[in-house]
Every structure is written in structure tokens, then in C-alpha cells.
């Protein structure tokens, strides 16, 4: 296949947004390529079906880490969606925008193009929010965003405890005020069904004759003529072929896959590439470096009274919940992974919240690897510092495009991160001690009272911690010459190649990355189309 103006490698949150935006002009031919299948798995649409999808290797990339002290000496697995919609088809559906200060900080190390004054309008353009339009919230965009419908006495107590901590209860926790908050969180759910990037952005665009969508087609590498990208080599049904492009190739594989595509294409550290027999197209030592991820810890409690949702996920009540979902698209199976959240400071003197707590009215059975709920009533939270300063790395160890790259997370490498991790847990325990929540709690069961000192809390993170599935930074965007990508998303040292996804973020916006990825991709489309217009005028 030849003649495309843009080839987009990866149909995740960024790729679907770009396909939607770029193909809106019928004169622009776009090819969107996804390694996984179409998003027809029946449990993708059901919000609480995510556990079933996350257990299906056909729909996932599974990246294994090198064992290290910060993962308790074990190998940790980070999974990503391998399906239309990418990780937005398998994630927890929380919609967290990040705060203006996060994007203004990104703009400081990149360019003014990424400041909140541009990202705020991008959010407004892409959203169709249940709460309606305001200064930055949109009501007419492709992405349907809704508020939780399942509310109970335990959730009320959890919010009240946050208010007792001095955190304002907000109707919209994404209000762009850089402040603390507690409340119900928006979800990418509409009428009981997941709103993945494929559902929101790709479905409306697929009817366009100028958009070609290829599934079960793995991008191996970018093909170059000299230093200009001319297409991609793909592996499809066991056959290699080259898909040509006379415009630009846009890599949207995410923080885990995009550096791998660049390295297989000859862009990276020369010694690493030469060891794998890959000809060097451009030396770029930071490809695969600067990997940043949230390190979360689940804190869990046994309750005195049967107020939790545990009973709804077992026995005849589970059957009732499933039936309620299929009949009314409502109830526990129509809920996101977490529907309550809090944003707070881990210690005095900070100018804005530096930790996020996701709050649930149920508790996991750790003996069953969190694949089931406990048989007694319980609740839990997952808490993590928002802006880790530690940096890991991810690199290929083989030229096989179907082999997921391995990585080193390097959590808690800095004193700042260790202080924030300890502080976050202490704040969570203080929250659990507030009225009226404290009266409902019998005991903390995870990590438990044995993990009390600073060293013991850090040991709990190492032993029981989890990644946030929010990795960024591995193809860092910056205004400095060492950055992989320049502030207009073009890969330095070559022509006709861009990267647009979480890998280019030089920092994690404060919270989950689905929303920021969509907003930054929307903004990237503005820049790409503006650059196209500039070239056309010059010609």
C-alpha cells in the first residue's frame, strides 16, 4: 500500500485521536495500524469486565521488568492494551485531567504550545461531559464522560472523612484550580458502556473513505530513505510488507512500545543497536531512558459492618449484578475500577497536591492475586505520589517486533520520592481515622500495623506495591538537543517522523494518563495540521 499522507503506528488513545482529527480533511489519506485485534471482546464494553480482558493475553502486551530492590527482588509485569483503543480498551476508565500547573511545567521544558492555555481548550473540544460545559469542560466533543451512578453509605463516609481532613468536596474533581479535592470521579463510560478511544474517536471516523484501519498488523520499524521516513515495515499474518507514506509517520505505541519501534528503526544508542545488528540511522542516547511511573500501594481495611460491595461480587448477588447490567446497563458491573478519589499534600509546605488516592467500597482477596473479593466486608484505597522524580528505562533485547521490551522501573531512587511515598501512607492512615469512617473500620489488613516506621512503609511498597499503568517519558520531548522529540513532536535527527503518546511526556500530569494523552494528541493534531499548511504554502 502506498500514497498515505500519514501513517499512525498504534491505535491507542493518541493514535485514535490523531486518526479522528487528521482524517477529518477528506484530502488527507491516513493509515492507522494496530498490532492487536478489533475491540469486539464482549467484556471490553462492560466496565467491570476489565479483569477478564486483562487476563486475556491476546489483547495485551506484557512487559517484564528486571528484578530490583524496589520491586521486592521480583520481576514485575506492566501490561498494555493490544487491541483497537489500546490501553483505553482495558483500563480502569477513570478520567483525570491533571492540573494547569502540570502542563505549564511541561511547557517550561518544551514550548508554550503545551501550556494549559492550549491544553484546557483541547479538553473542552474533545469532551462531551455529563456535567456540561464550562471554561475548560466540553459538552459537544466525541468523548462521552459521565459521573458515577452507584452511591452508598460507605462511599459517603469515605468522602466525609476527606472533608474532615480539610479537603474540599468537589462536584468536578478535575476543576483546574491546582487544589486539594475529594469526590466522585468522572469516568469514560456512557450508558453503562466503556468509552474507549476507539469507541469515541475511531468509530465515527471509520466511515471515511480516506481512513484505512489495519488490525493484527505489527509495526516492526520505520523505513528510511537516507534520513527521511518513507513508510513502515509491518508483520501481518506472518508476512512482511512495507506500507509507504509520502507525508509523515507518527509513532503512537505508548511509553512501552514507541522506544522499541525507534530502536528497531535505527534510532537510539549506537552501542545498543550495533549489538543487535541494527544499522544506526540516527544516534539518540535518550531513546528508552527517562521512564517514569507511579508506584502505588494498596491499603485495605476490614469493616465492622456489612456496608461494602464485596457481597455484590459473589454468589447469587454476582449473578444479579450481571443480570442487572445486561438488562439496565447499571449497577456494580457498570462502574469504573474506582469512582472516588482524593488529591492531597503528603507534607506541609507544598504548593499543590502531590499524591492521589483512589478509593473503593470493596476489598481484594490477595490470596487469589486480587482476582476475587474478600468474604468479609472490607474497603481499600490505592495511593501513590503524583510526580515521581526517579527515572527508569526500557529497551529491546531482540529485533522480534512481537517481543515486549523489558524495563527497569527504578522506583524510589530519590529522597524526594521516598519522602512522598511514606507521607502518602501516613496521610491515608490519618484519613481512615476520621469520623465517620473510623467508626466503621475494624482493622487495617494491608499492609497492616506491622508496617509502621518509614523503613517498613517503604518495604511495603517494595513487597506489595503496584505500578499505576501510567508510564511516560521514554521518548522525552524537550527544547534541548538531547531530547528524543522536539516541541512539535518531530523526532530529532530525521525527517518525516513524529512520536505522539505518553512516551513524549517529560513528566506525569497529576493523575491517570488517559485524559492527558487524549488532550495532548488533540493538541498535537493542531501542530501537525499547522505544519502541513505551512509546507503547502511554501510549495
Image (cartoon, rainbow, N blue to C red):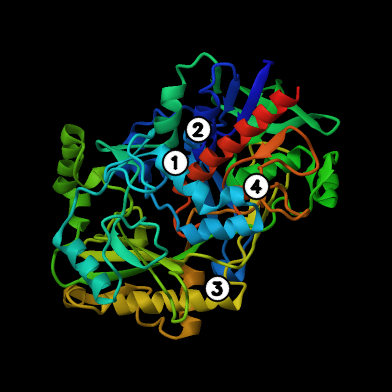
Q: Which numbered disc, 3 or 1, marks the residue that appears first in the sequence?
A: 1
> Which is closer to the viewer, label 2 or label 4?
2
Return the residue at label 4. Answer: 405
Q: How crowded is mark 1: few (under 14 residues within 10 Å), some or many (20 or more)?
A: many
What SS does tag 1 mark? helix
Q: Which numbered disc, 1 or 4, marks the residue that appears first in the sequence?
A: 1
- Mark 2–mark 4 CB contact (< 8 Å): no
Q: Which numbered disc, 3 or 4, marks the residue that appears first in the sequence?
A: 4
Looking at the picture, does residue 247 appear above or below residue 482?
above
Among all residues in the image, which is located at the extreme bottom? Answer: 453
Return the residue at label 2. Answer: 16
- Mark 3–mark 2 CB contact (< 8 Å): no
Q: What is the C-alpha distance between the residues marked 2 and 4? A: 23 Å
What SS does tag 4 mark? loop
Identify the disc placed on residue 417.
Answer: 3
Return the residue at label 1. Answer: 88
Q: Residue at x 51, y 29 (%)?
A: 21
Q: What is the C-alpha distance between the residues marked 2 and 1? A: 10 Å
Amino acid at each position: 500500500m502506498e500514497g498515505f499522507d500519514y501513517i499512525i503506528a498504534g491505535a491507542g488513545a493518541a493514535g485514535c485521536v490523531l486518526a479522528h482529527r487528521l482524517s477529518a480533511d477528506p484530502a488527507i489519506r491516513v493509515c492507522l495500524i494496530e498490532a492487536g485485534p478489533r475491540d469486539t471482546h464482549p467484556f471490553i464494553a462492560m466496565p467491570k469486565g476489565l479483569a477478564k480482558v486483562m487476563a486475556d493475553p491476546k489483547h495485551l502486551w506484557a512487559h517484564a521488568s528486571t528484578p530490583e530492590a524496589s520491586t521486592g527482588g521480583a520481576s514485575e509485569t506492566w501490561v498494555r492494551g493490544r487491541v483497537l483503543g489500546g490501553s483505553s480498551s482495558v483500563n480502569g476508565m477513570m478520567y483525570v485531567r491533571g492540573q494547569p500547573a502540570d502542563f505549564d511545567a511541561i511547557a517550561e521544558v518544551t514550548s508554550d504550545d503545551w501550556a494549559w492555555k492550549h491544553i484546557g481548550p483541547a479538553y473542552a473540544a474533545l469532551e462531551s461531559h455529563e456535567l456540561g460545559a464550562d471554561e475548560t469542560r466540553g459538552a459537544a466533543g466525541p468523548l462521552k464522560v459521565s459521573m458515577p451512578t452507584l452511591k452508598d453509605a460507605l462511599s459517603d463516609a469515605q468522602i466525609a472523612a476527606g472533608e474532615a481532613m480539610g479537603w474540599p468536596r468537589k462536584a468536578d474533581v478535575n476543576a483546574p484550580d491546582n487544589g486539594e479535592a475529594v469526590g466522585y470521579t468522572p469516568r469514560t463510560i456512557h450508558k453503562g458502556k466503556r468509552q474507549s478511544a476507539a469507541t469515541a474517536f475511531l468509530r465515527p471516523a471509520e466511515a471515511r473513505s480516506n481512513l484505512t484501519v489495519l488490525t493484527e498488523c505489527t509495526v516492526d520499524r520505520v523505513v528510511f530513505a537516507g534520513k527521511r521516513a518513507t513508510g513502515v515495515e509491518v508483520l501481518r499474518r506472518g508476512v512482511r510488507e512495507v506500507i509507504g507514506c509520502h507525508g509523515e509517520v507518527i509513532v503512537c505505541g505508548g511509553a512501552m512500545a514507541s522506544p522499541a519501534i525507534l530502536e528497531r528503526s535505527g534510532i537510539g544508542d549506537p552501542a545498543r543497536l550495533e549489538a543487535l545488528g541494527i544499522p544506526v540511522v540516527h544516534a539518540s542516547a535518550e531513546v528508552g531512558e527517562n521512564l517514569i511511573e507511579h508506584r502505588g500501594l494498596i491499603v485495605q481495611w476490614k469493616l465492622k459492618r456489612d456496608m461494602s460491595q464485596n457481597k455484590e461480587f459473589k454468589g447469587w448477588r454476582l449473578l444479579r449484578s450481571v443480570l442487572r447490567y445486561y438488562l439496565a446497563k447499571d449497577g456494580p458491573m457498570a462502574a469504573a475500577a474506582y469512582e472516588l478519589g482524593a488529591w492531597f499534600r503528603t507534607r506541609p509546605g507544598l504548593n499543590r497536591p502531590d499524591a492521589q488516592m483512589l478509593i473503593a467500597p470493596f476489598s481484594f482477596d490477595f490470596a487469589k492475586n486480587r482476582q476475587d473479593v474478600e468474604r468479609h466486608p472490607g474497603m481499600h484505597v490505592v495511593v501513590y505520589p503524583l510526580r515521581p522524580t526517579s527515572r527508569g528505562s526500557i529497551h529491546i533485547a531482540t529485533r522480534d517486533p512481537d517481543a515486549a521490551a523489558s524495563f527497569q522501573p527504578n522506583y524510589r531512587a530519590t529522597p524526594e520520592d521516598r519522602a512522598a511515598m511514606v507521607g502518602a501512607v501516613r496521610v491515608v492512615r490519618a484519613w481512615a481515622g476520621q469520623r465517620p469512617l473510623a467508626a466503621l473500620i475494624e482493622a487495617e489488613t494491608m499492609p497492616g500495623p506491622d508496617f509502621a516506621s518509614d523503613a517498613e512503609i517503604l518495604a511495603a511498597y517494595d513487597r506489595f506495591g503496584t505500578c499505576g499503568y501510567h508510564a511516560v517519558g521514554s521518548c522525552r520531548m524537550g527544547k534541548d538537543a538531547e531530547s528524543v522529540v522536539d516541541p512539535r513532536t518531530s523526532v530529532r535527527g530525521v525527517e518525516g517522523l513524529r512520536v505522539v503518546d505518553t512516551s513524549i511526556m517529560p513528566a506525569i500530569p497529576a493523575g491517570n494518563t488517559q485524559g492527558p494523552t487524549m488532550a495532548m494528541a488533540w493538541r498535537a493534531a493542531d501542530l501537525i495540521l499547522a505544519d502541513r499548511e505551512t509546507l503547502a504554502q511554501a510549495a
